[in-house]
Image: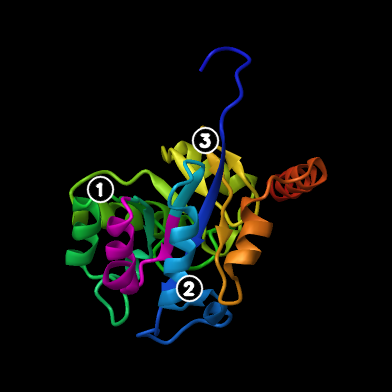
Amino acid sequence: MEAGAKSAVVRGLNFHGIGRPQRTLESGEARYWITIDGFRKVLDLVADRPDIRISFDDGNASDVEIGLEALLERGLVASFFVVAGRVGSRGSLDADGLRELSRQGMTIGTHGMDHRPLRGLSPADRQRELVDAREEIADTIGRPVDEIALPLGLYDRRLLADLKALGYTAVHTSERMPGTADAWLRPRFSIRVDDTVETIEREVLADPSRRAWAWVAVKRRWKRLR
């Protein structure tokens, strides 16, 4: 990029579960499970927008059973962030599903080992969540894993420093705000069960005000100072 040039604005659109859950959901998780019809309508809304970056968290079985086909039908790609400790369990992706996503050109990242907050980890938990989880996923798909999505969107300056030191090339959060294409810390909008095409157009696709940009900057600064 030339000196002084601004990076393109992008919007991260994040899905979790689609259709009927096949596992017991965690507290508060149901609000992020959307209908198949709703999912397809969102994809149709954004399919022709080059500023949209699509992702999926948690590694649910619906990623392959529903999500992959819908993406391929529209010529779209996405990033899939997998909870390594769930791979092969009921309602979650298995190893073949992970490999199929990778084979179809999707980016595979980590969402930790146990879907727990990653702040304040002990040395043993840091190894398990930030290193072992990534290595297990990489071994399964046969290629390096260098992106992470933060469970519950929580982080602080120590965690970000750890992720930098471990060589992660992108860190995906849950701040409902656009970002820039070349950012290391990447905000996303998580789609919820009560979202509609209208709310997404208004809250996600519309250009944010300067005040909104400033508020996100304040929140990020506060998180990093903890």
Could you tell me if the residues under marks 2 and 1 are in contact, i.e. CB atoms within 8 Å? no
- Above or below, 19 against 107 in this view is below
- Residue 61 occupies quadrant: bottom left
What is the secondary structure assignment of the residue under circle 1? loop
- Answer whether residue 122 is visible to the viewer in this image: no
Amino acid type of the residue that numbered disc 2 sits on in the rendered structure: Gly
What residue do we see at 56% from left, 48% from top? 159
Q: Residues within 10 Å of mark 3 (few under 14, many from 20)?
A: some
Mark closer to the chain start, 2 or 1: 2
Q: Which residues are magenta?
A: 55-75
Find residue 181 and name its label: 3
- Above or below, 20 against 98 in this view is below
Say left or right for 133 vs 118. left
What is the secondary structure assignment of the residue under circle 2? helix
Mark closer to the chain start, 1 or 3: 1
What residue do we see at 65% from left, 50% from top? 177
Find residue 158 and name its label: none
How many numbered discs sit on the rendered protein?
3
Disc 1: which residue: 105
Q: Nearer the viewer, mark 3 or mark 2?
A: 2
Disc 2: which residue: 38
- Residue 136 occupies quadrant: bottom left
Amino acid type of the residue that numbered disc 3 sits on in the rendered structure: Ala
Q: How is the image coloured?
A: rainbow
**Alpha-carbon distance for marks 2 and 1?**
24 Å
What is the secondary structure assignment of the residue under circle 3? loop
**Alpha-carbon distance for marks 3 and 2?**
27 Å
